[in-house]
Image (cartoon, rainbow, N blue to C red):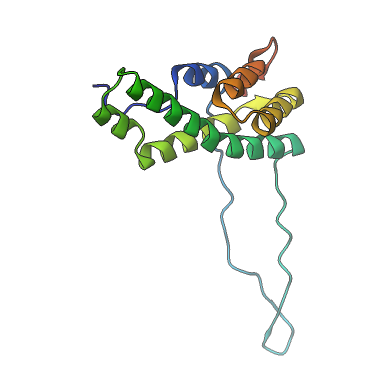
Amino acid sequence: MRGTVLLLSRSLRSLVAGTLTVVGLGGLPACGGAQHASDGEGSAARQQPAPVTDPRTPIEQRRDAACDRLGPKLTACAVEDARANLAAGKIGRDQFDRDTAPAIQHKNTEEFAKACKGTAYSSRQVRVLEVCFREETQCAPLLDCLGHLREPGATKDRGAR
């Protein structure tokens, strides 16, 4: 047995490995309590907190939204592949149950989203993610569509600056 088996199908793992790079998060800003100023009479005047701004660029926001939508869909495709392998006798029921357990599915979805969001995609590639999710309802065409991410000059690894 293969221990904890990633649920992603071989073609999907190849796609993810070929196009995504996981990067760590930098330091996150610390949270602090609300700031109060005295109004001179011993009570604190209420100040409106500064609006929270998203430090991501618009293309990064679109990429992250597309990654969040694609993760569950790709995990469902991997479950579909595992179900087909079970029906074909390629894996046993115990292996299927382990590979498709809800915790494994959740972990695969999270790992895909993390890797996807860690990739610096071009605007064309973000559009590929968005269009593939919206247009392709079946797994095989979805994976074929996502293959367009690998076209020449497709990814810019954040670490290669």
Residue 155 in view (yes/no): yes
Q: Is residue 76 above or below residue 40?
A: above
Judging depth in this view, the residue of 55 and 153 nearest the camera is 153
Q: Position of residue 142 (x, y in %)?
A: 60, 24
Q: Is residue 124 above or below residue 153?
A: below
**Residue found farthest to the top:** 152
Q: Residue at x 69, y 30 (%)?
A: 135
Residue 86, quarter of the rendered image: top left
Question: Does 130 sit left or right of 89 as displayed?
Answer: right
Q: Is residue 43 above or below residue 86?
A: below
**Residue found farthest to the front:** 87
Question: Does 110 sit left or right of 3 as displayed?
Answer: right
Q: Position of residue 16 (x, y in %)?
A: 53, 22
**Residue found farthest to the bottom:** 41
Residue 161 in view (yes/no): no
Q: Residue at x 71, y 77 (%)?
A: 46
Q: Position of residue 77 (x, y in %)?
A: 49, 29
Q: What is the tally of numbered marks visible in this picture? A: 0
Quadrant in which the C terminus is drawn:
top right
Judging depth in this view, the residue of 105 and 77 nearest the camera is 77
Judging depth in this view, the residue of 10 and 91 nearest the camera is 91
Q: Residue at x 56, y 38 (%)?
A: 26
Judging depth in this view, the residue of 56 and 95 nearest the camera is 95
Q: Position of residue 57 (x, y in %)?
A: 74, 38
Quadrant in which the N terminus is drawn:
top left
Q: Residue at x 61, y 17 (%)?
A: 144
